[in-house]
Image (cartoon, helix red, strand yellow):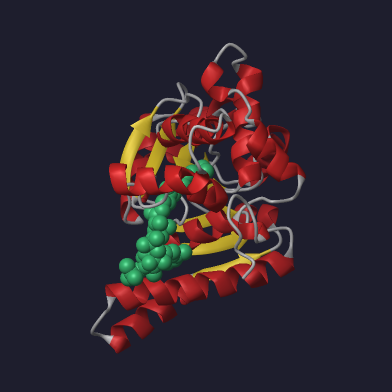
Amino acid sequence: LAGRALSTATARHNISHVTVIGGGLMGSGIAQVAAGSQHKVVLCDVSQDVLDKTINRIETSLGRVAKKKFADDANGAKDFIAATMDNLSTSTDAVKTIGDGTDLVVEAIKEDLDLKKKVFAEYDAVAKDHTIFASNTSSLSIGKIAEATQRKDRFGGLHFFNPVPVMKLVEVIRISETSDETFQALKSFGEAVGKHVVVCKDTPGFIVNRLLVPYLLEAARMVERGDATIEDVDAAMKLGAGYPMGPFQLLDYVGLDTTAFIAQGWAEDYPEEPLFKPVNVIAEKVKEGKLGNKSGQGFYDYSK
Ligand code: 3HC
C-alpha cells in the first residue's frame, strides 16, 4: 500500500492549486504572481487583519504590473487584474485548506526554525499524498525544516526576492531526499509564475543571500570604520557598479532586523566565518526600532 501511495504521489507534478502560508511581503508577492499565472491560490495567515491588508497590497501592486504589461490596453489590464483576483482567496485556517487538497504549499512565515517545523508537521498530517511542500526561507536549512515531515521526497526550497512581482528570479533548492519529480515540479512552477529559475544546494543563503548579505554587512563595516559616508557608499555602488539601489538603501528595503537576524543565525552556525560577524551600526538601529522602510526610519528617514 505504501508503494501504491508513493506512485500516485510521484506521478502527478502539474501544479494548479497553490496554498501560500504567511501574508507578509513575500507571501503576498508569491500569492500574487501565482494567481496572476492561472493558479488557484489560497493565501493563509493566522490574522484576518493581515489578510485584509495583504489584499490591498496585492491590488495596488497588480495595478502597477498591469499598467506596464498592458500599457496601451486598458481593458486587457482590467481583465488581468480581475482574473488574478478571481484566482485568489484567503483563509485563516491553513490546516483545513491543505487538508481539503492542494498541489503545492509555499511557506513564507517568520524565519523561526521551530515555528516552521511546527506548522509543517501539522500540514504533513493532513495533506494529500501528492502535495509538495516548499519553504521560502532566506537563511534556514531546508533539510532541517523538512525533518519535521514524512515527505522529504516531496520537499524543497522556493526562494523568491522582494518585490516578488518585479524581481525575475527564483532559487530552487533540493535536498538529498527531494525526488526528481518534486524537483522538476518546483522548477516548472517557478517558470510558470514567470521567473528565471536557478538551482542551488541547501547551503546558507543559497546563491543570492550568500553573496548579498556579506556585501551589505561589509558596507556597514566600511561606514562604521569611517572610511566613507552612507550617501557616498550608496552613490558609489549605484553609479560605479550599476546596482539599482545602494547597500544602505537595500538594507532599509530588506529590513535591518531581517538582515541582522540572518547574520546572527549564520554567525552561530559558523563562528569562524568573519563575513557573518554581526555589525554594531545595524544592531544599534534595530535596538532603536529603526528597521528601515517598514518602520519609517533606518539608515534613511522615510517618515516624510
Ligand atoms: N509591485 C509591482 N510593481 C512594482 C513594485 C511592486 N511591489 N515595486 C516596484 N514596481 C515597479 C514600478 O511600478 C516600476 O514600474 P515602471 O518601470 O513601469 O515604472 C518599476 O517597478 C520600478 O519601480 P520604481 O520606479 O518605483 O523604483 P525603482 O526603479 O527604484 O525600482 C526596485 C524599484 C525594483 C525595487 C529596484 O530599486 C530594485 O531592483 N532594487 C533592488 C531590489 C533587490 O535587490 N531585491 C532583493 C532583495 S534580497 C531578498 O529579497 C531576499 C530576502 O530573502 C532577504
Q: Nearer the viewer, residue 287 or 202?
A: 287
Q: Nearer the viewer, residue 134 or 248?
A: 248
Q: Quadrant of the N terminus?
A: top right
Q: Nearer the viewer, residue 20 or 184?
A: 20
**Furthest-bottom residue in this view:** 75
Q: Quadrant of the C terminus?
A: bottom right
- Residue 23 in view (yes/no): no
Q: Nearer the viewer, residue 218 or 171?
A: 218
Please tell me in which quarter of the rendered image ligand 1 is found.
bottom left
Determine whether, in the image, residue 75 is placed left or right of residue 223.
left
Q: Residue at x 69, y 65 (%)?
A: 50
Q: Quadrant of residue 280?
A: top right
Q: Position of residue 232 (x, y in %)?
A: 44, 45
Relative to 214, residue 102 above or below: below
Determine whether, in the image, residue 157 is placed left or right of residue 278.
left
Q: Position of residue 53 (x, y in %)?
A: 64, 70
Q: Position of residue 60 (x, y in %)?
A: 49, 75
Q: Residue at x 67, y 58 (%)?
A: 295
Relative to 176, residue 99 above or below: below
Determine whether, in the image, residue 94 is placed left or right of residue 33.
right
Q: Position of residue 151 (x, y in %)?
A: 55, 32
